[in-house]
């Protein structure tokens, strides 16, 4: 059933696949970081116009996945298509054209430290458009207003809190009105209030401008509360896929452990090790 | 038994790969020339960071080196009754060797390490990736202006070093030790050749400027994006720059002054 | 904006200082100010032996520098050294019977050409040749002559 819907290629493992042509289509992705195999044949579809969550334990390569989608890293094998274009077959100029349609929110915000908040948000506009300065000012102020931080436009990023820096970075990511935004762990290390602000901002921005959002996170409840679709990846494979409700109701033992945060289960509390007694009694 | 051999081979291959990466970066830097030319504002900011901020240390060092040369030169030359040649000795050693070399070492310590740390931190805090994602090439926009800033600042700093050093030697030799001021200058003018000495000194400092900024930018750009990686990159910048400058100085001297 | 302007001014001052330093080195500390690049008129002279005379060595009259050596060549037919020198244009009254000698400045100094003015009313012009020349003194020859004359002095009284 799923194969009929997506048209070409095999569909991801999930039961219900989002309808319509996906914006991002990943097939047979393999990627190794040094000796460690991060992805071993991952298939993933990101539908247009929704919020898709990609969740998994720390160290499963969720950030790497975003870097692969945006063409900053090259897979060992497999293809990643964004809007029908194979990201890793594009030349530099074409890749940059594609990236102008993507925004990315980095974990740290990644604001340019020697520019003010205003100049940071204005940076992509000044780089890629020939708009007059008055127009840029209006656009920047509107973007900053959307994230509620018009008041700090003259400050340097170093004076902002982590949550505010992330919101400024979000304003910068949407400055060029992209089609898609990639969020790298947007909730990590946030106090409950700024977490709540970010959660609603992501949903609100997505719906207000008809974006496609990919949220990579291991904060299960916050992420699922705003996601339309969700993937859970671990051990280099897709463990579960489907709508947020379907994933939440998953019966897979492993997924249950991850979602409910149980200390022991299919993923063990102990790292693989020889028998404790033998280790203790053996010669040092 | 073959393990040490394999380890040697592995480190050799790794070093070669790094050298290759460094050269790719250099090609990228040269490729950003046009982008830097159309944005002179970025270049000015870097000439400030590398040149203006290094001026004080370079000028003060130049003054002291010149004064030491004046003292030492006087003691040696006066034993041969050739104290009038002090001007030649001070000027020749400054313009040919000490000016370009000491300036390059000072700039590597003062500005090169700062460059490596800055680029390394931008990498560690994902600023370089963020630029990539904004479809802006960080090599062209961030690294190339710094490269040309260093290339431009180095010969000017070396000239200041030599000029101040010559004045320092004059101060010691003529002001303190009572040599004839006219002899100091005229001997210098008679023996220091514009194209052989001064132009060659400038060529040296341009080469050193290229090498020092290139090493600093590469170490920053290739740094492991952690606090430890950045600190290692700054250390390496100073060590590699010093070795490269001294080694290249020998080669350039042999090419320029060895007939 | 004020900060940008300060930086621009400082960079301007820095570059000006750098160029001033270069200019100072070029004019005050090197021979650039005293070398009129190539203009002047050329004279040639033939010597049996130029010793260690170098290109760019000074040419002086009465101890004043009037020009410099531009080229040293070997004439294969006469087995002589042909020295071309450039004389600064203001010194255009050198008599055509002037003597050209190769002198050494000091005991171990460099060699230079000294011109001893003659008494002729005609002056040398561009491309002319100095007829009267005296070669460089070669230390070994001098010592050899000295020993030879001493030996003869010792032999005569008997």
Image (cartoon, rainbow, N blue to C red):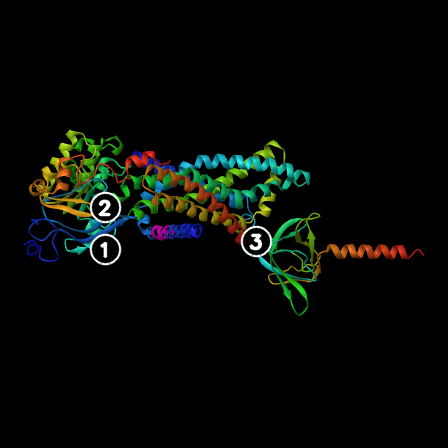
Magenta includes B24? Answer: yes
- Residue occupied by mark 1: A77
Chain bearing tag 3 is: B
Q: CA distance from mark 2 to mark 3?
A: 55 Å
Mark 1 and mark 2: Cα distance apart in space: 15 Å
Image vertical order of residue C125 relative to residue B220, above or below:
below
- The kind of secondary structure element at disc 3 is loop
Would residue B201 be counted in the magenta stretch? no
Of the pair C135 and B136, the residue shown nearer to us: B136
Return the residue nearer the eye: B227 or A161.
Answer: B227
Q: Which residue reaches farthest bottom? A: C77
Q: Please give the range of residues in magenta.
A: B21-30
Mark 3 residue crowding within 10 angstroms, few (<14) / some (14–19) / many (20+): few
Determine contact: label 3, label 1, CB under 8 Å: no
- Say yes or no: labels 1 and 2 on the same chain: yes
> In front: A157, or B259?
A157
Q: CA distance from mark 3 to mark 1?
A: 56 Å
Q: Is residue B51 visible?
A: no
The answer to whether residue A20 is above or below residue B79 is below
Q: Is residue A155 left or right of residue B104?
A: left
The residue at which mark 2 appears reads as: A64
- Image quadrant where residue A231 sits: top left
Residue designated by label 3:
B258
């Amino acid at each position: 059933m799923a194969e009929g819907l997506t048209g070409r290629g095999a569909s991801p493992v999930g039961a219900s696949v989002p309808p319509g042509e996906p914006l991002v289509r990943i097939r047979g992705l393999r990627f190794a970081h040094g000796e460690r195999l991060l992805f071993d044949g991952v298939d993933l579809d990101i539908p247009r116009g929704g919020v898709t969550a990609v969740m998994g334990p720390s160290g499963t390569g969720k950030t790497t996945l975003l870097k692969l989608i945006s063409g900053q890293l090259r897979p060992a094998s497999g293809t990643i298509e964004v809007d029908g274009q194979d990201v890793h077959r594009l030349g530099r100029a074409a890749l940059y054209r594609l990236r102008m349609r993507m925004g990315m929110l980095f974990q740290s915000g990644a604001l340019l430290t020697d520019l003010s908040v205003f100049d940071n948000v204005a940076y992509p506009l000044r780089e890629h458009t020939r708009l007059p300065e008055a127009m840029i000012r209006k656009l920047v102020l509107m973007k900053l207003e959307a994230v509620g931080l018009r008041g700090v436009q003259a400050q340097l990023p170093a004076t902002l809190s982590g949550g505010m820096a992330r919101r400024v970075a979000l304003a910068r990511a949407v400055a060029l009105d992209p089609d898609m935004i990639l969020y790298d762990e947007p909730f990590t290390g946030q106090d409950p209030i700024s977490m709540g602000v970010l959660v609603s901002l992501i949903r609100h921005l997505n719906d207000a401008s008809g974006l496609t959002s990919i949220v990579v996170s291991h904060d299960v409840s916050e992420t699922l509360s705003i996601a339309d679709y969700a993937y859970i990846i671990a051990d280099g494979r897709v463990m579960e896929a489907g709508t947020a409700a379907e994933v939440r109701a998953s019966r897979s033992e492993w997924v249950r452990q991850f979602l409910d945060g149980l200390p022991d289960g299919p993923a063990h509390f102990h790292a693989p090790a020889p028998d404790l007694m033998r280790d203790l009694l053996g010669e040092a | 038994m073959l393990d040490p051999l394999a380890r040697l081979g592995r480190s050799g291959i790794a070093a070669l790969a790094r050298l290759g990466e460094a050269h790719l970066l250099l090609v990228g830097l040269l490729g950003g020339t046009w982008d830097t030319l159309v944005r002179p504002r970025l270049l000015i900011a870097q000439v400030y960071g590398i040149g203006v901020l290094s001026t004080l240390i370079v000028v003060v060092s130049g003054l002291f080196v010149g004064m030491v040369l004046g003292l030492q030169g006087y003691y040696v030359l006066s034993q041969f009754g050739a104290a009038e040649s002090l001007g030649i000795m001070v000027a020749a050693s400054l313009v040919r060797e000490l000016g370009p070399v000491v300036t390059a070492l000072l700039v590597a310590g003062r500005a090169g390490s700062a460059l490596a740390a800055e680029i390394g931190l931008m990498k560690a805090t994902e600023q370089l990736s963020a630029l990539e994602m904004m479809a802006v090439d960080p090599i062209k926009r961030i690294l190339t202006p710094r490269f040309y800033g260093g290339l431009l600042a180095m010969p000017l700093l070396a000239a200041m070093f030599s000029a101040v050093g010559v004045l320092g030697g004059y101060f010691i030799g003529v002001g303190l030790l009572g040599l004839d001021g006219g002899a100091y200058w005229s001997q210098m003018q008679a023996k220091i050749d514009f194209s052989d000495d001064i132009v060659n000194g400038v060529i040296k400092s341009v080469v050193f400027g290229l090498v020092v900024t290139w090493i600093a930018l590469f170490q920053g750009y290739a740094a492991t994006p952690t606090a430890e990686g950045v600190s290692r990159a700054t250390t390496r910048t100073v060590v590699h720059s010093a070795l490269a400058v001294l080694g290249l100085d020998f080669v350039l001297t042999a090419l320029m002054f060895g007939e | 904006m004020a900060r940008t302007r300060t930086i621009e001014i400082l960079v301007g001052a820095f570059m000006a200082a750098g160029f001033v330093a270069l200019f100072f080195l070029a004019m005050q500390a090197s021979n650039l100010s005293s070398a009129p690049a190539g203009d002047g008129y050329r004279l040639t002279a033939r010597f049996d032996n130029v010793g260690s005379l170098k290109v760019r060595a000074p040419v002086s009259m009465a101890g004043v520098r009037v020009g410099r050596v531009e080229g040293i060549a070997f004439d294969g037919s006469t087995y002589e050294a042909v020295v071309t020198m450039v004389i600064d244009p203001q010194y255009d009254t050198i008599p055509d019977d002037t003597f050209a000698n190769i002198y050494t400045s000091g005991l171990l100094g460099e060699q230079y050409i000294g011109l001893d003015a003659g008494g002729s009313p005609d002056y040398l012009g561009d491309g002319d040749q100095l007829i009267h020349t005296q070669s460089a003194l070669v230390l070994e020859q001098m010592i050899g002559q000295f020993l030879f004359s001493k030996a003869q002095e010792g032999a005569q009284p008997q």
